[in-house]
Image (cartoon, rainbow, N blue to C red):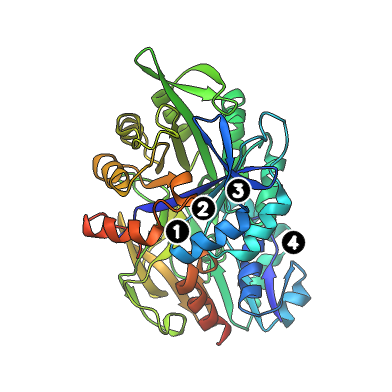
Amino acid sequence: MIAILKYNAGNIKSVQNALTRLGYESIITDNPVELMNADKVIFPGVGEASSAMRYLKERELDKTIISLKQPVLGICLGLQLMCRYSGENDTECLGIFDSDVRLFPPVDKIPHMGWNNFLTIKGDLFKGVALEDDVYYVHSYYAEISSCTSATCDYILPFSASMKSENFYATQFHPEKSAGVGEKILQNFLNL
Amino acid sequence: MLKRRIIPCLDIKDGRTVKGVNFINLRDAGDPVELAKIYVKQGADELVFLDITATIENRKALAGLVERIAAEINIPFTVGGGIDTVDDVAILIKAGADKVTVNSSAVLKPELISEIAGQFGSQCVVVAIDTKMVDDEWIVFINGGRIPTDLRTVNWARMVEELGAGEILLTSMNNDGTRLGFSIDITGEVSRNVNIPVIASGGAGSMEHFREVFFNTGCSAALAASIFHFGDITIPDLKNYLINEKINVRC
């Protein structure tokens, strides 16, 4: 069973719909036991960092997430909350990835919204994916490139398109909204 | 590199897709979910669903339809029409919408933009602006283009950015339904004056019109309805044409 973390962010249903289209059953839950017993956990995105972290902490879900041993996939805000710190309302995050999250400098349109390709890709999530493949982004904050970065994208500056640390994977883009390329990446995660 | 987006817009009335000519005479253009699936297959970059009667009849956008759309399609979509409160937004987001558009309600109650952005993030708030040139001045109209306001379009665009909008969907009512091309004038002016993405809307009649608006303005996306619904232009043909014209779009 795949568990999708329920918290006060949007896009949760979209992730479940994408899994259903790929033929996987999933539950949306904030129950720590269900999260710990799931084969895989998805930590979805879209929302505001400080209110999302507050919600997680009030329910001690921050501790549950950090303790997970199965493959975990953070998406968009999920990736950012798995970093150390977010500049979005000065938020201490989960500290899984050794990277900080910053607001894009205002030298081009913000948010970075739309389809963009990769500068670099490596690792299991990107099997069968090419650098020129486009995936869908919607974000104003980005994770700096660090030792956990597994894919990069260029918008205003190069940033982490995907990160990995042990069993924790994350994408800044939305695989569930990235048509066929996104389905390939989700399937790669589900195959782990 | 970030791609320019092509966005088919599905205007919804009573669960069906319609397209008004200058916002009045409505013609039936089919089932929204079936149309959405066709556009996804053809390579649309995003979809917009506007419940065009919602504001007038004070109805909420249809969460049930949103759920059906979300189940079927794997690209982002925006839903608008009749959104008055953060609670309305929560229902649509929960049903699977990626973004919402607010139009009249944002003009009447600008703090709604900040409230939605505060709760769901700026990236989910698209402020739709219907604009028309009146006495050499572009001004904002509300209630489906029926009521003029005192707001100058560029000033309102700057204000919505400050309030936390993530994107502007700018429809020129002078151009909408004419098929004579997008308004380069106001699209360019708004794009230059805000630092959030602007979607050009109203007036698409040929592939050249898309090249023109992308080449001459800083808009991030171009939206059209009837030319796609009636098959005058297909999305693959349009994208091939734009790539040949050196406009960066997703293949």
**Can you identify the residue that label 1 sits on?**
B44
The secondary structure type at the circle numbered 4 is loop
* Pointers 2 and 4 within a single chain: no
Question: Alpha-carbon distance for marks 2 and 3?
Answer: 20 Å
Q: Where is mark 3, residue-wise?
A: B120
Direction bottom: furthest residue: A192
Give the x, y percent position of residue B147: 56, 19
What residue sits 43% from the left and 45% below the top? B223
Question: Do marks 1 and 3 share a chain?
Answer: yes
Q: CA distance from mark 4 to mark 3?
A: 19 Å
Subunit under mark 4: A
Q: What is the crowding at mark 1: few (fewer than 14 residues within 10 Å), some, or many (at least 20)?
A: many
Asked whether disc 1 touches disc 3, contact meaning CB atoms under 8 Å apart, the reply is no
Chain bearing tag 2 is B
Q: Residue under circle 4?
A: A59
Q: Which mark is residue B47?
A: 2
